[in-house]
Amino acid sequence: MDSNEDGATRRDFLYLTAGAMGAVAVGTAAVPIIDSMNPAADTLALATTEVDLSSVQPGQTITVVWQGKPVFIRRRSPDTIAQIRAEDWHSFRDPQSDQDRVQKGHDEWLVLVGVCTHLGCIPKGSKPMEPKGEWGGWFCPCHGSTYDQSGRIRKGPAPHNLKVPDYAFKSNTLIVIGEKPKSAPKAA
Amino acid sequence: MSRPANPEKFSNPCIQWIDERLPIFTMLIKEYRVFPMPKNANYLWSFGGIAMTMLILMIVTGVFMAMNYDPNTHGAFESVERTMRDVNYGWLLRYAHMNGASFFFIAVYIHVFRGLYYGSYKTPRELLWIIGVIILLLMMATAFMGYALPWSQMSGWGTTVITSLFGAFPLVGDGLVTWLWGGFAVDNPTLNRFFALHFLLPFVILGVVFVHVWALHQTGSNNPTGVEPKTPKDTVPFHPYFSTKDSFALVVFLTLFLAMIFFAPLALTEADHFKQFDPMQTPDHIVPEWYFLPFYAILRSFTLDISIPFTNIILLPAKLQGVVAMFGSIILLMFLPWIDASPVKSARYRPIYRVMVFLLVIAMFALGYAGSQKPEGLPVRIGQLGTAYYFAHWIILWFISRNGFMGVIPKEQTLPVPASISDDPCCKH
């Protein structure tokens, strides 16, 4: 058998090449199997939900279902907005201004995925009789995470603010959750 | 190449005919009749066989329950209730399966304790031990997915909380959780895959158990002295000595199991397990099954983010620390044969380690209590103390089995070990 100075033979080379090709084949075959566990087309087709906001009163919160998860939509009064924007948010756990959490020109509408960022429970505070926590927002009964009226985490174990989903205003009272907002109109 | 002639001749010509073609009877005689067992093995050595019996019982009851199960979010809860009310002996199948999981874990936890106490993980049984840890991990995955199938409030929310843990991993977390769910929340695709895997994994476990037993029969059983058998006088044949002893232990164990099924079948079950899953309403208190509580407590013991000093940049969020610690607490066991360097196996002759094993058991019970309580106030502190000991245990073990650590941790002075099993003064039979 041919062999070079290190004693490696043609056969060693063939073993390694065949082994490498086999590994590539197994890896390639694994891709469709693993990907089959990702959301299927019909699940993805449910990716947007249309919500009519015309009947929501100031101070009221409605809960709608989007992708199997609750979405909280709260209509906030101008007083509330003024009050939360007066706070210094830089020292919060997940620092973010209220302006960054709503869409420009629609500041009264706060839209949040109603899933606690700690371990996935549904925070209370959307219904009138439910506890809202110290900041008047939401309170998670599982581990005591408390969110403010901007959905920002203020107390408890949750690492992040309540997530703001993608949503787009079709008119002043109609939104589509799951759709990316059109680029904000340029300031005049 | 000639095979050695089979010394055993079976008087039954039919058995002889089969054995010459497939030596299954020769194998059974070698592994289950003449197989040498250390003569001093105590009742703690019965729990492997008990666990194996529970595995088979779980597979049988599970397969027959699956015949009445509807793996769909609209029908799952009702089909389980129908099994309980309408299917002939359906209540028995389900109660045996629900409580069987608990008794399977009881048997396995005692089996693991036996291994820890008598040093059964030490050379030459390292691989046997590692395969055992793999079985434990597979069991945990199987039990977790089985808990989802009745599609109750506890099923759905337990699944949500535990699968959400994977979201703690940086960058890939969210994609990983979506992949596990097959959607954007715990829903029908999640239930379907959990059912498929819950059906498959027990057979995988059965296969790994076969490998576990194979490795055991290569090295032979450990014993309370930790001294390997040296002469045939140290051992007795498996049958009839240990077949009888194990059968007796099994009967006692199964009696307790049946008593549980018939007199307290729901003692270990949360009330929210009898309410259908509502993805819009979280129960006030989500707890896993008792056998996961210590690990759940470890998960929740980490409450402080680690950040770069004087900035808001978080390096290691508390949630990620908890997830890593929880999985790490079991993975760590695989390295035990190399963490513990002591040449003495049995805790009987290791005064410090002996105390430490019992402390570890106490820590596990404390963690179990902490995991069952709401995570506020005293239970959190108890959980953190338990977690601290759990991890400190292996570090201390590393040092006492070597040369100690800077005078803080002493080197363990082991006691004299008997020259052979037959010289063990407590077992002179």
Image (cartoon, rainbow, N blue to C red):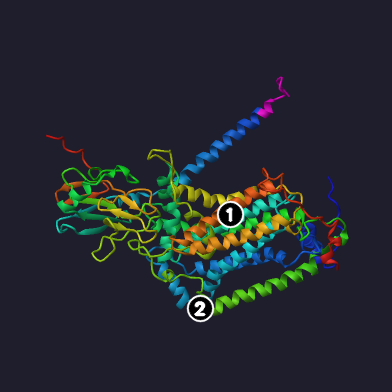
Mark 1 = which residue?
B389
Which is more foreground, mark 2 or mark 1?
A: 1
The image quadrant where one finds the C terminus of chain B is bottom right
Residue under pointer 2: B88
Majority secondary structure in the magenta region: loop
For numbered disc 1, what is the local secondary structure? helix
User: Is A4 one of the magenta-colored residues?
Assistant: yes
Q: Position of residue B122 (x, y in %)?
A: 72, 51
Q: Is residue B281 visible?
A: yes
Q: Chain of mark 1?
A: B
Q: Could you tell me residue B129's position as x and y percent?
A: 67, 53
* Residue B123 picture location, percent across and down: 74, 49
Q: Secondary structure at mark 2?
A: loop
In the picture as drawn, the residue positioned furthest to the front comes out as B407
Q: Which residues are magenta?
A: A1-12
- Camera-nearest residue between A101 and A144: A144
Residue B200 visible in rendering:
no
Q: Quadrant of residue A59?
A: bottom left
Q: Is residue B76 above or below residue A89?
A: below
Direction top: furthest residue: A5
Q: Tell me the number on the disc at residue B418.
A: none
Mark 2 and mark 1 on one chain: yes
Q: What count of labels does the image hold?
A: 2
- Mark 1 nearby-residue class (10 Å; few <14, some 14–19, many ≥20): some
Is B372 on the left-hand or right-hand side of B330?
Answer: left
B9 sits left or right of B362 in the view: right
Q: Amino acid at mark 1?
A: Tyr
Q: Residue at x 34, y 59 (%)?
A: A140
Q: Residue at x 59, y 33 (%)?
A: A20
Task: Calculate the distance from the C-alpha at mark 2 to the C-alpha at mark 1.
Answer: 49 Å
